[in-house]
Image: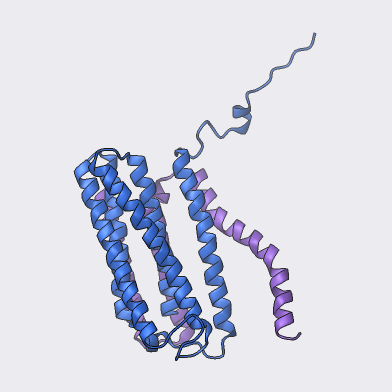
Chain colours: A purple, B blue
Amino acid sequence: MYRIYWIAWSVLLALTLVMVVLDQMPIPRQTFVALMLGAMTIKASLIAGYFMHLRFERWPLVVGIILGLPINAAILYILIVPDALRIFGMTSGR
Amino acid sequence: MATHTVEPVIDRWGGGACPFAAGWRKVMMWAFIVTDGLLFAGFLASYGYARLMAERWPPQQEVFSISYLAVMTFVLISSSATMASAVVAAGASDRRATTRFVLLTILGGVAFLGMQAYEWAHLIGEGATLTHNPWGDPSFGSYFFLLTGFHGSHVLTGLIVLCVTAWHSAGGRSSANGVEIAGLYWHFVDLVWVFIFTLFYLV
């Protein structure tokens, strides 16, 4: 069991190193952002899946967690956006 | 007289007595992690908006040492790996290994916080405050101090939890479940840093 964590650790460190190296290279902005977001998603999945054991949990818990965050975020967004837009209109004089 | 059978609620629901196959403390820790994740998601969304609206957002390579930040990231990821190992050791009832791995995790957390304090001191020395900075948009300083400070306060909380866990483990009073829950929180702190490192320092 230890082995799987240290493999995840190695991949996480390698990905961090790749991100830092790419940061020093002259890559077009959009490509750079896409690469960074891709690496970030893989790193987050490795941490949640292996270190936090989500990969080994029963599916109702996994679905509850994975859907819980975006659903709650969507509810907050729907509730907050009308006020946010009104305030933005007030501050920008529109 | 007509009779009818009432099915037990549990059968109609079909979820079983323990659909998550996890204890309530673990499920509650996950609920906390989801809500705390929302807090950071809101924070990062607000940062994204401020950055899009800014006339000149300071180029990160001019302000930060990315290699120094990479070392900070290495330290935090390594502490997550030692914590995952502590959970395995606790599951195997290996008290000595559990305590050793938790202490290594604490060491990583302290090193990370020390490095963050140094980074803060360096930027404050160069004139960065919550409302002003010498590199560009004024909100840059606000977001830097609030995002990293908020994350740092989570690291500090995690360190307190880990110290209690190590104390209990050394005294033979910790349970595998308790170590796992402490580990979940610590990995969450690592997970949030992955987002901050990418979205604030690199992109």
Residue farthest along the left direction in this orientation: B96
Q: Nearer the viewer, residue B149 or B191?
A: B149
Q: Which of the 4 quarters of the picture holds residue A13?
A: bottom left
Residue B33 in percent (x, y) is at 48, 54
Q: Which of the 4 quarters of the picture holds residue B93?
A: top left
Residue farthest along the top direction in this orientation: B1
Residue B46 in percent (x, y) is at 57, 73
Task: Say which residue appears at 39% left-offset and 86% top-offset.
Answer: B63
Q: Residue B173 vs residue A88: left or right?
A: left
- Which image quadrant: the N terminus of chain B? top right
| Residue A14 seen in the figure | no
| Total numbered circles | 0
Asked if residue B38 is positioned above or below residue B174 in the image, the reply reads below
Q: Residue A20 vs residue B12: left or right?
A: left
| Residue B55 seen in the figure | yes
Q: Nearer the viewer, residue B130 or B82?
A: B130
Q: Nearer the viewer, residue B14 or B73?
A: B73
Task: Say which residue appears at 26% left-offset and 43% top-offset.
Answer: B169
Asked if residue B192 is positioned above or below residue A85 in the image, the reply reads above
Task: Say which residue appears at 47% left-offset and 85% top-offset.
Answer: A29
Q: Which of the 4 quarters of the picture holds residue A12?
A: bottom left
Residue farthest along the right direction in this orientation: B1
Residue B49 in percent (x, y) is at 58, 78
Q: Nearer the viewer, residue B6 or B51?
A: B51
- Which image quadrant: the C terminus of chain B? bottom left
Residue B147 in percent (x, y) is at 47, 71
